[in-house]
Amino acid sequence: MTFKTSGIRIGLVAQCGWSRRIAIACAALAAIAPAISQPAAQTPAYRAPRTSDGKPNLNGIWQVLNTANWDIQGHAAAPGPMLPLGAIGAVPPGLSVVEGGEIPYLPAAAAKKKENFANRLTLDPEVKCYLPGVPRATYMPYPFQIVQSQKRIMISYQYASATRIINMENPKKAPIDSWMGWSNGHWEGDTLVVDVTGLNDETWFDRAGDFHSDALHVVERYTPRSPDSMRYEATIEDPKVFSRPWKMSMLLYRHAEDNAQLLEFKCVEFVEELMYGHLRKKSSQ
Amino acid sequence: MIRRSLTSSFFVPSAIAVAWLTMPLAFGQAPSAVAAKTAPAPKPWTLPHLPDGHPDFEGVWTNASVTPLERPKELGAKEFYTPEEAAEHDKHELEDRTSWDRLGNQATVHYDMSQFGLDVSKVKVALSRRTSLIIGPDGRVPPLTPEARQRLADRAAKQRGHEFDSYENRPLQERCIVWANEGPPMLPAAYNSNLQIVQGDGYVGILQEIIHDARMIPTDGRPHLDSGIRQWMGDSRGHWEGDTLVVDTTNFTSRTAFRGSTETLHVVERFTRVSDDTILYEFTVDDPATWTRPWTAQLPLVKVDAPIFEYACHEGNLGMPNTLSGARAADKAAAEKAAQKDAK
């Protein structure tokens, strides 16, 4: 007998109430029932379409519909750091994507986050078109594309031409630290689980100054929940910055347009004046 | 059409079969038709396919090369070296020349690349018996049209004396916007000439190590982007011709400037796997505003057993501020010298 639906569990509980003689057995069942039904509740009812090798098919162009890139924690609308931009530069409001709402910063790190926020115009790596790192690449306001094969999965992000290759074969150790890190992936049921290490300490989590060190370890989980959406979860572990691991959770939506495609957003040329303009020859200004 | 039948060395796709018969190629283990007649029949090679039925191009490949794009003039119409000549040429290129020779006049202000394992003498090289990557009796980029000559002369005149005025005067690859080798067409770089191919549902992804640009090529028959959308690397559309992947790219910017080209640049690339270790890569480029005729080049991509590393070009670009700071310091020194002269 399987305890797949809550209907069966409710039925048992009702029977218990009906007959006092089996109360002990009922208590035992009542204790077991939630334990049995819980995995069933976590297993999504949705079964994703398969690739030709039988794996859940994540191929496609995806993007978030949230404002986590402005601030992963819940935030009201606010003026942006560049007042001349008016409403264009304002911060759109958004709910927290951090489970529990709080990021468990160590005391010194909490102070640094505040300092980062105060100086975000000069310190946020996004201002300089630097590679976004993981998980920030996922929830920037730009699409990304998954090209999935058996041995590896390529993720190409529109922002700054950032790219990752997820190794789906035997996990390998990160050979060196990098901006986008080193990704080993495997399947747990319909969920793609990606273990990311080898991340440098140059990237942030958002425009609000949330940051990490080079001890960052990210475990991502991509779980299809309908033909055009999947859940994205990222567990963040960094003992140099946080007192305990914490987790982000959000939804990714498919670009379902027939002609959807990644276009170039090679932003280097948009930041050169900011970065190198002061070195321009005087007479040519 | 998807071709799933077993493809032995004797039944390779027609274009390649012709190539084997007419050209003495020297790619990896691929047996030539001539050799097959005289030597004991080699074990037939089977083109590997992915579960979706398309040929398997997956893996990390290098196009590192010691073959010049254009044929040295003294070789005339000689398109191929003999095996002995090829061995001598490759040995000379890889053993006699240093990375400083290869870098030319940059070497004195740059570094010895062999020290960092970047030089072509330190890596796996996609050897070819071709005397130039460009095929045909000329082996050279065709002459520029009069319009293109004028355009390039004007551009050079405008730039002369202003090379260090600003970031805008520096080459695109020094600015980490797009490297000249990235293309399309994809050509060997001075170092890190590696690319990785991943094939998903209706897409072929090609990641080039320099400078971490991934090309996402749809093979579902969709039309090119609207002509109003222009991109540094153009807009690529792929389709299968038998076991060959054909990629058509248009919609380039006028600033992409592949060897002086304009926004009417049109590139057609053909990928054909010819052995476990080798993909034959061929491209034809055309731009009526630049060259008097289209031209075609052919080079092997050879399998490498190593991951692609992240080439974070812009993030590590200390070269740009250093170059411009140096130029401004020189301006200042020159101005002070002139002022001293005036004072005397």
Image: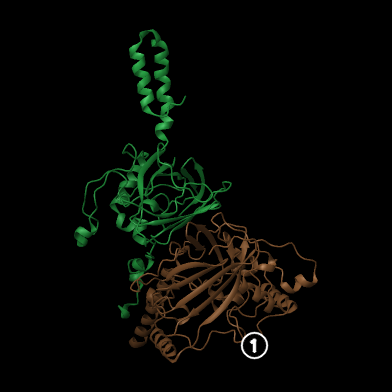
Chain colours: A green, B brown
- In the rendered image, residue A245, in percent from the top left (x then y), is placed at 42, 38
Q: Identify the image quadrant of the C terminus of chain B.
A: bottom left
Q: Position of residue B283 (x, y in %)?
A: 54, 75
Left of B79 or right of it: where is A30?
left
Determine the chain carrying the residue at label 1. Answer: B
Q: Which residue is mark 1?
A: B77
**Is residue A82 shown left or right of residue B235?**
left
Please state the horizontal and vertical placement of residue B27, each as a whole percent of the image: 67, 70
Q: Position of residue B53 (x, y in %)?
A: 56, 58
Q: Nearer the viewer, residue B276 or A9?
A: A9
Q: Write down the quadrant of residue B171 in the picture.
A: bottom left
Local packing at callout 1 (Cα closer than 10 Å; few below 14, some 14-19, many 20+) is some
B244 relative position to B94: left or right: left
Q: Is residue B156 visible?
A: yes
The amino acid sitting under disc 1 is Ala
Given the current orientation, which residue lies at the most extreme bottom position?
B146
In front of the other: B259 or A197:
B259
The answer to whether B255 is drawn above or below residue B50 in the figure is: below
Looking at the rendered structure, the secondary structure element under dot 1 is loop
Going by the picture, which residue comes out furthest to the top?
A21
Q: Which sits in the foreground, B231 or B36? A: B36
Number of numbered discs present? 1
Residue B139 sits above or below residue A35 on the image: below
Viewer can see residue B173:
no
Q: Is residue A120 left or right of residue B35?
A: left
Q: Residue at x 34, y 41 (%)?
A: A98
Is residue A103 placed above or below A28 in the rendered structure? below
